[in-house]
Image: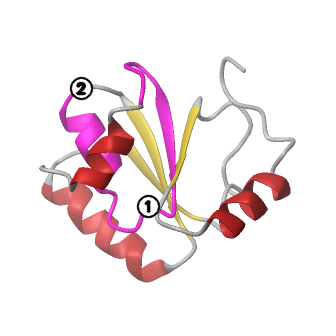
C-alpha cells in the first residue's frame, strides 16, 4: 500500500513495535501500511461511523491483515480500553475536535505510559 504524503508523514512518526490506535481511521490505510511493512504487530482501527469501518474491513481483508487489526465502532477513544495501545493517531479532523477527544479521555492509560 502506498500512502499519501500526509499519511506517510504521520506513519513515519510511529515507533517500531508500537501498538497503535488509529482514531477516525476511515479506510484503515495507516494501520494496514504499518502492519504490512512490519513496523507494528497490532492496531485498533476506530471510527464513529459504520460506513468507514466497513470500508476499513474490506481493505483489511484485501491486504490479509485481519489477524493484526481490530475494528472498533467508537466515538473517539471511548471504546479503547486502558493499556490496549501505546500510540494513538488522531488525524484528519480539526484541532477543536481532537482536543475534545483528548479532554474527554484524559484518564485513559496507555501501555508503557
The numbered mark at residue 38 is 2
Between the residue at mark 1 and the residue at mark 2, the CA separation in whole angstroms equals 19 Å
**Quarter holding residue 104:** bottom right
Q: Residue at point 59% right, 34% down?
A: 85
Q: Is residue 25 left or right of residue 28?
A: right
From this view, report whether residue 66 is shown above or below residue 84: below
Q: Residue at point 31% right, 51% down?
A: 7
The numbered mark at residue 101 is none
Q: Is residue 75 left or right of residue 104?
A: left
Q: Is residue 100 left or right of residue 68?
A: right
Q: Give neighbour class at mark 1: few <14, some 14-19, many 20+ (Cα, 10 Å).
A: many
Q: Give neighbour class at mark 2: few <14, some 14-19, many 20+ (Cα, 10 Å).
A: few
Q: Is residue 79 left or right of residue 15?
A: right
Label 2 element class: loop
Q: Residue at point 81% right, 51% down?
A: 105
- The residue singled out by tag 1 in the image is 25
Amino acid at each position: 500500500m502506498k500512502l499519501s504524503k500526509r499519511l506517510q508523514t504521520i506513519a513515519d512518526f510511529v515507533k517500531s513495535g508500537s501498538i497503535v490506535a488509529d482514531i477516525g481511521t476511515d479506510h484503515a490505510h495507516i494501520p494496514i501500511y504499518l502492519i504490512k511493512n512490519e513496523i507494528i504487530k497490532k492496531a485498533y482501527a476506530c471510527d464513529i461511523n459504520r460506513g468507514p469501518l466497513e470500508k476499513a474491513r474490506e481493505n483489511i481483508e484485501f491486504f490479509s491483515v485481519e489477524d493484526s487489526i481490530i475494528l472498533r465502532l467508537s466515538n473517539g477513544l471511548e471504546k479503547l480500553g486502558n493499556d490496549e495501545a501505546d500510540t494513538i493517531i488522531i488525524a484528519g479532523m480539526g484541532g477543536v475536535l481532537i482536543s475534545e477527544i483528548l479532554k474527554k479521555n484524559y484518564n485513559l492509560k496507555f501501555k508503557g505510559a
